Amino acid sequence: MIGLIAETFAGIFLPPFRRKEFIEQLHFVGNKSLVIIVFCVSFAAVVTILESSFHMKLVIQNDSMVPGFAALLILRELGAVVTALLLCSRVGAGYASEVGSMQITEQIDALKMLGIDPVNFLVVPRFLACVLGGMMLTVIANMTCIFAAMAVSESYLGYTPSMFLTSMHRFVQFKDIIFATIKGACFGGVIPLVACHFGFRCQQGAEGVGRATTNTVVVASIAIIVIDFILSYTFSHLY
Amino acid sequence: MTKFISILDEIGGTLLFLQKILGTLFKKKLKTHDVFEQIWKVTAESFFTTAMAGFFVGAIMTVQFAMQMTEFGALGYLGGLATSGTFREVGPLLIAFMLSGKVGAFTSAELGTMRVTEQIDAVRCLGADPMQEIIVPRFIGIIVSSFFLLGAGLVMSVFGGMLMGQAFAGVNFEEYLRHVPTIVNPISILNGLIKCFAFAVVLATVCTYKGFSATGGAKGVGRAVVATAVTTMICIVVMDWMTSFLAEIVLTMVRGYRS
């Protein structure tokens, strides 16, 4: 694992850079996941509003601070983490089964025979595409999420969008979106590394591919939660 | 347009499969031994994963709430709020995500392998009903074990929150736990349990269906696993919304006014 990470980081700066493959992977990560992510994140935003209003009423008897609080929660945690988990299930599982199939059909050995470094050939474009795609998708997801929260808070709690934005202005700073983007990039970088690690070590047969995919999703999810914790803790000192 | 039709096809297939499962469950004899075996297997396999995820979820929630609470000077409520948020909403959701990655993917891979290597047809040839022998035990196993795992995850989340509250906000354990009983009422816990049940049913149905209908060798198994992971994630988020909304409506009816 460590070796793969080191080789990937070295491979970023080594020629050849496969531009076409990178663009293709970016299309797979960004474009094809966009609809799913936007759809899911909107629902998550609705639930956030409902729950935070419930909690506010418990503690301070009214829900005047719900919009700001929900926006804060969305920007700091929810947008980035839900996006990353969805990407992990979709992109991570896809990469793992793809690379695993290549491994058991001996395509990776064929690459080595031809003198091509499989890490540089396979992992680096995917890694870069996932980092970039994770950043972009996190920003889009955050914006969608806030929009959905605005709509729900108007229909359900009776706050107009202007009230929502004013309340948001008090709670949220520009720093938050920068930090969310950094989080998205880190989460995106984890996914292909884990997926390719398990894909390269895939064993023969149908069971091997299934096991590689399962392991990828689990390890990447855990890694995302742990990294999220570390980054939250780090960023909390910077406010 | 064809894509839309194929999505509808998938939904219909899954629902018909669920109908078949429930029919088998209520009409035919339950294989108790297999059910217990599955419960044990699923719980033992995912216990560590969910406990660890729960621990970090509690820690994250506490860090996020602590920042806000210090602003309002209400650090006494930190433990209660973080725990309540985890119990009602974040805990079930994230544990369901974890389970969908671990149990869902594993089950669909296993069933897909069985399908591809023609073991399911072999069971049918021997005169047994594959639904009764293979699917229903897994279905019940996932649903029952999800409750155990949820419990483990939530307990660990409280521990994570306590440690983080001490390390990050300087709230000692006693102070952290003081407001938990006042804020976390039975309805909240019931809410979390209902959510967990809904997620488990969705997860069990989707992963068994996708595994059962896998075709085309090793690649097909890979495809089935990917499809399972994606579909369960989407379904879980949608179910989350539906259960939240329904709970709100039911509570409004019970109380007679809108909170």
Image (tube, rainbow, N blue to C red):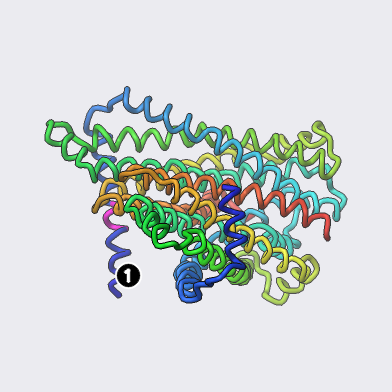
Q: Looking at the picture, how far across and down is residue B224, in whole percent? A: 33, 52
Q: Position of residue B135 (x, y in %)?
A: 29, 38
Kindly identify which residue carries mark 1.
Answer: B4
Residue under the image location 82 percent in, 38 percent down: B166
Residue A126 to residue B123: above or below: below
Give the left or right position of residue A24, taking residue A60 as reference: left
B197 left or right, relative to B255: left
Badge 1 element = helix
Query: Can the viewer see residue B89 in this picture?
Result: no
**Furthest residue in direction top, as rendered:** B33
Question: For the point 50% across and 42% down, which residue is it?
Answer: B196
Please identify the quadrant where the N terminus of chain B is shown: bottom left
Q: Is residue B154 above or below residue B66?
A: above
Could you say where residue B128 lies in the image, as x and y percent from the top left? 16, 31
The answer to whether residue B14 is magenta is yes
- Is residue A133 at least partly visible in the picture? yes
In the rendered view, would you say A62 is above or below B111? below
Q: Is residue A71 magenta?
A: no
- Amino acid type at mark 1: Phe
Q: Residues within 10 Å of mark 1 (few under 14, many from 20)?
A: few
Number of marks in the rendered image: 1
Residue in front for this viewpoint, B164 or A44:
B164
Q: At x 57% / y 67%, what residue is drawn?
A: A128
Q: Nearer the viewer, residue B229 or A116?
A: A116
Observer-nearest residue: A144 or A24? A24
The overriding secondary structure of the stretch rendered in magenta is helix
Magenta segment:
B11-15
Where in the figure is residue A50, as x and y percent of width and height? 61, 57
For residue B88, above or below residue A39: above
Determine whether, in the image, residue B96 is placed left or right of residue A54: left
Work out whether residue B238 or residue A130 is closer to the camera in this orientation and state it.
Answer: A130
Instruction: Name the chain letter of the residue that bears numbered label 1.
Output: B
